[in-house]
Image (cartoon, rainbow, N blue to C red):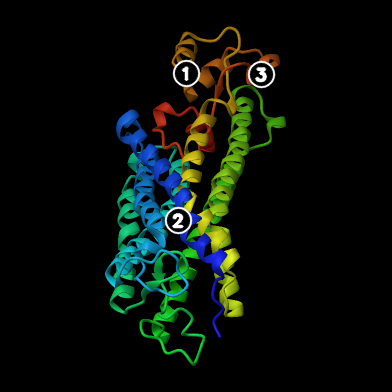
Amino acid sequence: MTVQPNETQQRAIAYAIKPLAILSFLSASYVVYHLLVQKREKLKRMYHRIILGMNIYVLPYAITDFVGTWAMPVGTPYRVGAAGNQGTCIAQGFIQIICAAAVPYYYSSLSVFSCFAVRNSFKEENYRHIEKWIHLGAIFVTLPIAIMFATRESINPGISVCYLAEYPNGCVDDPNVPCERGGDSLTSSIETIYGAAFAIITFIIPPAALLYLRGFIKRATRDTNRSVGKKKLIESLRKRALKNLTAQSGLYLLSFWSTQALGYISFGYHLITGKWSYSLAIAGICCSSFQGVVLMLVYFRLEAKEDAVAVCDFPEGETEDGQRAKANAKVTVADIREAAKNTKPRSWRSSLSSSRRYSFNIFDGQVDESSPWAKVLNPDDD
């Protein structure tokens, strides 16, 4: 027999998600406004275009979360506020299927993008071809799945929104309750494959790509104790880049996982026990609905780190070109090397710990000429 939510849980299902969905919508709206209106020049770089695409998908996702049980057909059992019909339910579920997959897809693509960016010294012309596949993949992977589930009558009232579910809820597990919509074995198998695929996209691909990137940077790092002059400075900068990569990767991965983990744990509990833990499911749904806020905070946090992470300065006696670079807050590899030639060995440590600050951002997508780190990470350029 299927366990249904109690009255308190029914009210939580109907209303707990709404304020979080509003915050998520406002956060995504601000990021879109920031990129399209306030800082449109950022869209010259691929990283910010990927961020824009991701937040565009967050907007309809947040709207359908806010609508919640209102879209479910009137009279749906154990769902407070059900006021729609089968058409509104299918429409809501159709959007949810696309956006719920597209957002982690985009987030995962950032880790793959960062590998291409760093390996190509941030020269976008060398890897710009992947951008179209990132954007097209977000819709071409999810749209056919949504169409298939809609035509197979598998979009029905779920826990808080219409999504992939049988109707009546729990009929698959209860032989005494026949399924009126969905619930056939083929659809259930496809649903399991669908869930597993996006678990891999969310939890496997991002750390795998970032571990690969860490290994690439580490291979470019040499023993600074055996380095002198400009090589010692370059090796020190490489090690700082590695440290920054670790910090940024941790922020990037853990923040997004915090919005998804409880949902997967709740679904895993259901697969193992055949029952829903509604308290756990509600917590997972709320975390997922809050993802727009988390994505916004991570985006601006990584931007804030850009001028406050890695230290790189020119010591006394720097060249005219080095002074000009400092004034423009853009240090090139040529400036570093020229400063190295005109600096006494004893001043390397002080030059590395002085006041000018620049960061190595694995997602910044800056072109080679404007990145002080580009060729520093290429061991062939020493």
Closer to the camera in the image, 324 or 309: 309
Reply above or below: 340 against 246. Answer: above
Q: Return the residue at label 2.
A: 104
Closer to the camera in the image, 296 or 115: 296
Residue 219 visible in the shown view: no
> Marks 2 and 3: which is nearer the front?
2
> Marks 1 and 2: which is nearer the front?
2
Dividing the picture into quadrants, the one containing residue 80 is bottom left
Q: Return the residue at label 3.
A: 348
Residue 162 at x, y percent in the picture:
39, 67
Residue 14 at x, y percent in the picture:
46, 61
Q: Residue at x 47, y 8 (%)?
A: 320
Question: What amino acid type is highlighted by mark number 3?
Answer: Trp
Q: Return the residue at label 1.
A: 329
Reply above or below: 280 against 340. Answer: below
Question: What amino acid type is highlighted by mark number 1?
Answer: Ala
- Element under label 1? loop
Residue 217 visible in the shown view: yes
Q: Residue at x 58, y 22 (%)?
A: 312
Residue 169 at x, y percent in the picture:
45, 78
Using the numbered discs, state the Cα–Cα distance from disc 1 to disc 2 in whole angstroms. 34 Å
- Element under label 2? helix
Counting residues from the start of the chain, the first of labels 1 and 3 encountered is 1
Is residue 337 toward the left or the right of residue 125 in the image? right
Q: Residue at x 72, y 30 (%)?
A: 225
